[in-house]
Amino acid sequence: MFKKDTAVGQLIAAEIKRQKEGIELIPSENYVSKEVLEAMGSVLTNKYSEGYSGHRYYGGNAIVDKVENLAIKRAQRLFKTDYHINVQPYSGSPANMAVYFGLLNFGDKIMGMRLDQGGHLTHGSPVSFSGKAYNVVSYGVDRKTERLDYGKIMMLAKKERPKLIICGATAYSRTIDFEKFAKIAKAIGAVLMADISHIAGLVAAGVHPSPFDLADVVTTTTHKTLRGPRSAVIFCKEKYARAIDRAVFPGLQGGPHDHITAAKAVCFGEAARPEFRKYARQIVKNAQSLAAALADLGYRVVSGGTDNHLLLVDVRPKGINGKEAQNKLDAVGISVNKNTIPYDPLPPMVTSGIRLGTPAITSRGVVEKDMKVVAGLIDECLSGKDSAASTKKKVINFASKFPLPGTSK
């Protein structure tokens, strides 16, 4: 590998070693297959193809058109939808931006979930373009249950009457009721956008309810639980297709990344297989096993548990904050991210909690009993029951039992 550029080759080799020897618990990360990696590294990266299939601004796109059409057809089959599909967005944030640019005017009112209670930056955070370009009304979770209160969301929507409502989250561990969101949007005549970036793989596998036929627009990244390349897709009802397509290109992007489009097609094909449905079910089982084990060890799991691939853990009962927990775990080879919890008294760069997820570790073949071991290693590290060096050896020993997908290592 990289015989001429040994500096880059050595760094990639070091990252393979880090991934192989560590325990990956960041819920937005996953391991892709060898086929997805090969598509991303293919000669399709050489091509420029501004425009859409059959309507390009450059010549030589006959094969690229077939690649893009294949990705679209596979996405339709996977999610069992006849929605219009745009597979060109570079990633999740530009995909959401394209929806807003296509369907709204600057200054229009939108309503999304608060960042510090589980929402995403692009759902209206004041530090994001979404919070700067639009008039934002935010909803959160109930202080006591730490779950969405759809009655309160309905009242807020009727009071504020946003033009677009965003449902979906990046740090919410419970099932999202798309039917209730659809009723809220219908009650005020708002466009409903479901951002399923975190749960797309669970939706595709039937492990989480689907927003299709309920939401007007559905956006998703193609990594995370979907286990594909770092990119995104937009689905929408036909009446919004032209506006959103024009917002993607030429509004926000130039030529699509054709090698990534091919990798999306591979990903959608893989996710349509029976073994992927088994994998998605195991993701949830593993998350629930981890949540229960950590609760037994004295940690407070936000909302009392999880219905999906992630959980938020309040680490303050152990006398530390989220930043300290993240750093300690990182030192022993366990990757998590510090994360605010609902109504967090600590600032976002410190936090009271950590966010844990099971998509990546499940891809390595881990099951429920193994998650109890993982919980024990987390507690051993955070509670100082053994030295960091000793715990790291245990982490490497544990990880070595499970192959790293996509590599021969």
Image: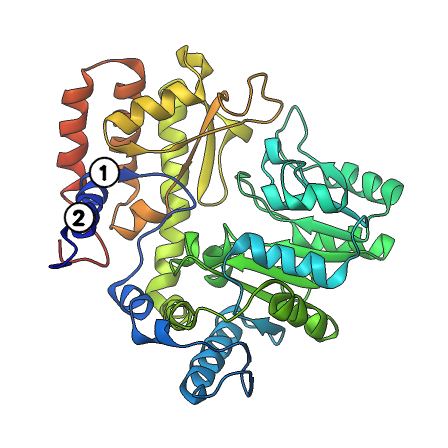
- Say which quarter of the image contains residue 344: top right
Total residue callouts: 2
Image vertical order of residue 289 relative to residue 403, above or below? above
Q: Residue at x 72, y 37 (%)?
A: 139
* Image quadrant containing the N terminus: bottom left
The residue indicated by pointer 2 is: 7
For this rendering, which residue is in front, 194 or 104? 104
The quarter of the picture where residue 170 lies is top right
Q: x, y (%) of residue 92? A: 53, 54
Label 1 amino acid?
Gly
Circles 1 and 2, Cβ within 8 Å, touching? The answer is: no
Give me the residue at 58% from left, 72% from top. Answer: 85
Q: Which residue is mark 1?
A: 22
- Disc 1 crowd, CA 10 A, few/some/many (<14, 14-19, 20+): many
Q: Mark 1 or mark 2, which has the lower sequence index?
A: 2
Q: Is residue 64 above or below residue 4?
A: below
Q: Nearer the viewer, residue 168 or 67?
A: 67
Choose between 186 and 62: the one closer to the eye.
Answer: 62
- Residue 383: mark: none
Q: Secondary structure at mark 1?
A: loop
